[in-house]
Image (cartoon, rainbow, N blue to C red):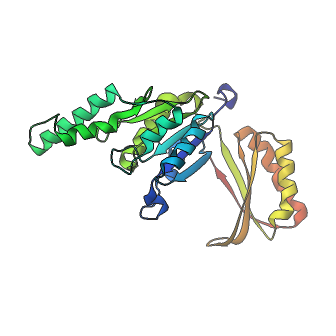
Amino acid sequence: MSNTSHPPRPEFGLIIVGDEILSGKRADKHMPKTIELLAERGLPLDWADYVGDSPERITQKLKRAFDSHSIVFSCGGIGATPDDHTRQCAARALGVDLALHPEAEVLIRARMQDVAKEQGVPYEPDRDDNKHRLNMGVFPQGAKIIPNPYNKIPGFSCFGSEGGAVHFVPGFPVMAWPMIAWVLDTYYPHFFQTNAWVEKSVIVFGAMEASLTPLMETIEQDHPGVKVFSLPSVDHPQYGRHIELGVKGDPTKVDQAYPQLLEGLKPFGAKLGPELVRS
């Protein structure tokens, strides 16, 4: 299927919430996995933000996401402990109230019954800790649930008036990643662009980025929709000091732009190494 048969693609973004990421206590695994999940569907990750457990900053980032036309995944902070602020911040960013979601309540109660059965104790719905667990299903009004195949405790999706959508999942990778995949496959298959993107590049030795800039600008002007990139390295374990110079985009357009890139390098007298192709 050609790229022209797809509707215009929105940007895909990622917000990762948690002081533990910024302090270095935990390393972020969500961004590389989200890039992988999107790439499997022919989509890129356009931007990513990290934010600590600050309600003000979380609210600002979510408001910006809702006011955009982006599709955003937010990982972390949707629990019911004092350092979890994301659910409240989402409601504040949307200007709506929080309420116990009826479907979430059913799922959370089912989870509590499962746990009681596993522990061999009676299910006591009015016990204080069980009542507190229902807070994990208190979402901004109008939210839609995201199923959690790991333990039934759902995430949720909210949609802004300006077209932005934010899909909230837990910080635990074992839960978050299948939930992100479910959102993509449920809401956005019409944006999938399998085999509609390719990247071609060449390793360049003995050239400076500044001198290559006019060539890069010319190729982007001559081939609208193609992105030209330059990735310099000073200590690559295989190639040493070099620049990886390439083009990426629709395969047909890349096939037209890449020969021009190679031809344009000839006047520089630079030594060329391996050519690389990624799709």
Q: Nearer the viewer, residue 101 or 116?
A: 101
Q: Is residue 93 left or right of 253 when viewed as pictured?
A: left
Q: Nearer the viewer, residue 256 or 180?
A: 180
At 41% from the left and 47% from the top, the residue drawn is: 77
At 64% from the left and 33% from the top, the residue drawn is: 9
Q: Is residue 80 left or right of 6 when viewed as pictured?
A: left
Residue 216: image location, x then y, percent: 82, 53
Residue 95: image location, x then y, percent: 51, 31
Inspect this view and state whether residue 135 appears: yes
Q: Nearer the viewer, residue 263 or 180?
A: 180
The quarter of the picture where residue 262 lies is bottom right
At 42% from the left and 48% from the top, the residue drawn is: 76
The quarter of the picture where residue 3 lies is top right
The residue lying furthest to the right in this view is 267
Across the whole image, how many numbered discs are drawn on residues? 0
Inspect this view and state whether residue 153 appears: no
Residue 46: image location, x then y, percent: 62, 45
Q: Quadrant of the N terminus?
A: top right
At 61% from the left and 38% from the top, the residue drawn is: 195
